Image (cartoon, helix red, strand yellow):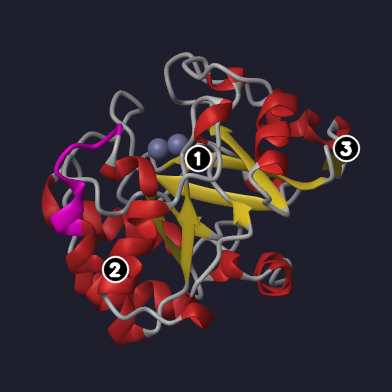
Amino acid sequence: MKIIADMHTHTISSGHAYSTINELAASAAQKGLQALAVTDHGPALPGGPHIYHFGAMRFIPREISGVRIFAGCEANILDSDGKIDLPENYLSRLDFVMAGFHEFCGFDDKGTGRNTEAMINAMHNPGIHAISHPGNPAFPVDYEAIAREASLTGTALEINNASFTFSRCGSRPNCEKLARQIGKFHTPVIVGSDAHIAQNVGEFAVALEVIAGAGIEEAQVVNSDLERLIGFLKPSG
Ligand SMILES: [Zn+2]
Ligand SMILES: [Zn+2]
């Protein structure tokens, strides 16, 4: 299985990342990727971009260095209702919206039950395509419930490569458990590097190992084919 688009990357606009969009795209081209989603953190993250950042993404060319660019966001889930830090009219202007839990954004770990409830409610927001790093041990969730609901709502669950290398220590056993549930419910999957610097764009090795180990089929992995990816990103209306 080949991943043709990195769907989780951060630019300097995130406040704690180190490359520009041009540098990310050049790295993606060098690694043979066809597409790249720029998913800077939502405005609730300390040091994150102002909401205007997401309104101004129309200035970004559709292609940079021969790589198709998807304007995106990694929004923050703010409460148990699944509310996120970008309003509807901003979401509809973006190609790809992920939502996830991050500390210091207004929703800290509330235990498995309430975390699961918040994540499931976010999946019911039609503007959200995917949930970022759902295997994060800092925000435990019920993996069976998450995989089932994501399958029902057509929300992709991310297998985040950085969770196995740089970030969210202890993610691997959780992600392996989640991956087995994803296989069982035929839930859509997005693979992302979560690169915070250009050199890490397109790094998917451990994520692919976890996916293979759980018997997840290639057809479930949304960004293993450009046509499948574009079909998945189409607004549901
Ligand atoms: Zn994140
Ligand atoms: Zn991220």
Q: Are marks 3 and 2 in contact (CB under 8 Å)?
A: no
Mark linked to residue 61: 3
At x 63% / y 55%, what residue is drawn? Answer: 5
- Would you place residue 16 above or below residue 37 in this image? above
Indicate which disc, 1 or 2, sits on the residue closer to the N terminus. 1
Badge 1 amino acid: Ala
Mark linked to residue 75: 1
163 drawn magenta: no
170 drawn magenta: yes
Res. 61 visible in picture: yes
CA distance separating discs 3 and 2: 35 Å
Question: Is residue 109 shown left or right of residue 234?
Answer: left
- Would you place residue 21 above or below residue 234 in this image? above
**Could you say where residue 130 lies in the image, as x and y percent from the top left?**
49, 58
Report crowding for label 1: few under 14, some 14 to 19, many 20 or more residues within 10 A (C-alpha). many
At x 70% / y 28%, what residue is drawn? Answer: 21
Q: Which residues are magenta?
A: 166-174
Badge 2 amino acid: Ile
Report crowding for label 3: few under 14, some 14 to 19, many 20 or more residues within 10 A (C-alpha). few
Q: Which residue is mark 2?
A: 146
- Would you place residue 26 above or below residue 211 in this image? above
Question: Is residue 234 shown left or right of residue 59?
Answer: left
Residue 235 quadrant: bottom right
Nearer the observer, disc 3 or disc 1? 3
CA distance separating discs 3 and 1: 22 Å
Mark linked to residue 45: none
Q: Secondary structure at mark 2?
A: helix
